[in-house]
Amino acid sequence: MTSKLNKKRLFLIWGGIAALILFLTLSVTLIRLPIAIALRAAETYPDYFSFEFDRDKWRESHSSVELILIETLTKKILRDWVTQEIYFQLKPGTKSPYTHVGEAIQRIASSLQKSMLSQRHVDWDVLELDLPNRLILGWGYCNHINQILSYTLAEIYGEASAWATRYPETGVSKQAAGKSTHSLVVININGVEVFADAWNSVHVFKIVDEKNILTDIKAYDSMPTVTPEEKFGFQKQAKGLLIKKAYTNGWASTFDRDRVISIGMFDFGIKSDVGYYLTKYQNDVDILYVIGRIFYLYGFYEESRELFLTIARTGCEDLLSCKLARKYLEYSFED
């Protein structure tokens, strides 16, 4: 009798432990990473949140556990932001993303374009950084920006592909022939391929829709294809579209699917004191910039703007963080 009771107790104990682990796992997954933890990570590992980040050098002075921890945190920030972005852009009262596909993509791509600047705003050399770091630092090329868009649209529509374009071998200049010049996103809605682009000024279009299923999305042939006046590679200002064959010759470079559990569904909205960071790092514009970006990604725009204004007032010119802070003040805090 005693043996049976002990087994029952053990069963209940282990069952309780398993339930607790499940509860904690779901809590960590469903609750957005508190901003205080994100800010503390930036303070503790400022070299990791750097435009000059070198993974091999970083490993020489940090343990594998630290690397796993910081990578987990940054991925959590990225995924939380995607979840919250969907919530804010598609909250109750907005039109359904399934019946108004073009409008939903337009809202999300426009918001992402304000959240991440590119070589359209600040010319800088290509830097090899993981995607979460790209979002946190807030600067990237078309493939970095649109990869985040792909993650986001996959959460809504189930699947999305980052789409690399390629010019044909003939019918274009020798400089452009066969070149991949751009990266955007393709999703399939009821058999219609929809092209989405948070980097370009044209955020959404379709090429083929014979039955006119998606009526709120403009067809490529009805849109202007203005040649860019200035160029980074083949395309800089993104005033118009590439030639049609550049899109139809493209290929899916990565493929994204929606997740079973939406990460960071709930946000306590606890805000840290921005004055503390303004005082502590008044002579370190790089850390101020990263902290300003974290405030921005958490939706504390006034605090982020205050940090960027502080950077701009220092008069620094050459650092990328200084250039970007000024550009964010110009482009990202408009209504």
Image (cartoon, rainbow, N blue to C red):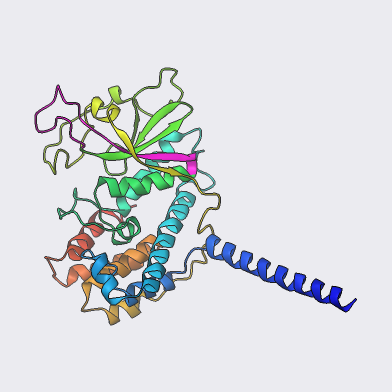
Image point 24% across, 29% down: which residue?
246
Q: Position of residue 314 (x, y in %)?
A: 16, 73
Report which quarter residue 35 is drawn in: bottom left
* Residue 73 in the image, given as x and y percentages of width and height: 41, 66
Q: Splitting the image into 4 quarters, where does residue 109 fall?
A: top left
Q: Is 185 placed above or below 245 here?
A: below
Relative to 175, 183 lies left or right? right
**Coordinates of residue 119 in the picture (x, y in percent):** 19, 50
Is 157 inside the magenta-drawn segment?
yes
Question: Start and end of the magenta stretch?
Answer: 156-180
**Of the pair 132 and 278, the residue shown nearer to us:** 132
Query: Residue at horizontal 81%, vertical 76%?
Result: 6
Q: Residue furthest bottom?
A: 280
Q: Residue 211 versus residue 170: which sits nearer the camera?
A: 170
Q: Is residue 126 above or below residue 24?
A: above
Quadrant of the snapshot with the N terminus: bottom right
Residue 302 can be seen, yes or no = no
Main SS type for the magenta part?
loop
Q: Is residue 328 in view?
A: yes
